[in-house]
């Protein structure tokens, strides 16, 4: 449920997570997506001339809560006529858990 943003390397800080792999001029992967940056990574990227990178932007907790509530409301609307059926109730819980996990 997080967004990504491209930033200059000078704005990157240790602890940020890469949203996309970083490649050198030859196309070789320097760091894969999902790596949490360290000071050592940042120093190495500066030495290699990397100017920009895409990081995961920390999500606003209130926005996450609103999104989760919207997901829950949509799933409940879809299953609104099946509340008495145990099999449908089990499916409702499975769909709700899946959608909340995937954020959609």
Image (cartoon, rainbow, N blue to C red):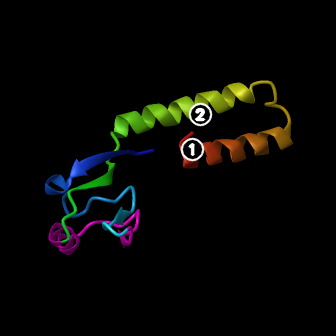
Residue 22 painted magenta: no
Q: Quadrant of the C terminus?
A: top right
Of mark 2 and mark 1, the one earlier in the sequence is 2
Which mark identifies residue 3?
none
Question: Label 2: which residue?
Answer: 72
The crowd level at tag 1 (other Cα within 10 Å; few <14, some 14-19, many 20+) is: some
Give coordinates of residue 81: x percent, y percent: 80, 24
Q: Is residue 8 above or below residue 14?
A: above
Q: Is residue 15 above or below residue 66?
A: below
Secondary structure of residue under mark 1: helix
Pick the residue in front: 67 or 54.
54
Q: Residue at x 39, y 57 (%)?
A: 20
Residue 34 painted magenta: yes
Question: Label 1: which residue?
Answer: 100
Quarter of the rendering containing residue 52 = bottom left
Secondary structure of residue under mark 2: helix
Evaluate if marks 2 and 1 touch, with contact meaning CB atoms under 8 Å apart. yes
Q: Is residue 78 above or below residue 22?
A: above
Give coordinates of residue 68: x percent, y percent: 51, 37
Q: Residue at x 36, y 34 (%)?
A: 62
Give coordinates of residue 3: x percent, y percent: 38, 43
**CA separation, marks 2 and 1?**
8 Å
* Magenta range: 27-47
């Amino acid at each position: 449920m997080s967004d990504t943003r491209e930033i200059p390397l000078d704005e990157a800080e240790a602890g940020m997570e890469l949203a996309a792999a970083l490649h050198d001029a030859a196309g070789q992967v320097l760091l894969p997506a999902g790596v949490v940056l360290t000071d050592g990574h940042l120093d190495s990227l500066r030495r290699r001339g990397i100017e920009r990178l895409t990081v995961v932007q920390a999500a606003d907790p209130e926005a996450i809560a609103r999104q989760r509530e919207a997901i829950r409301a949509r799933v409940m609307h879809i299953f609104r006529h099946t509340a008495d059926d145990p099999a449908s109730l089990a499916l409702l819980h499975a769909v709700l858990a899946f959608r909340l996990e995937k954020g959609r």
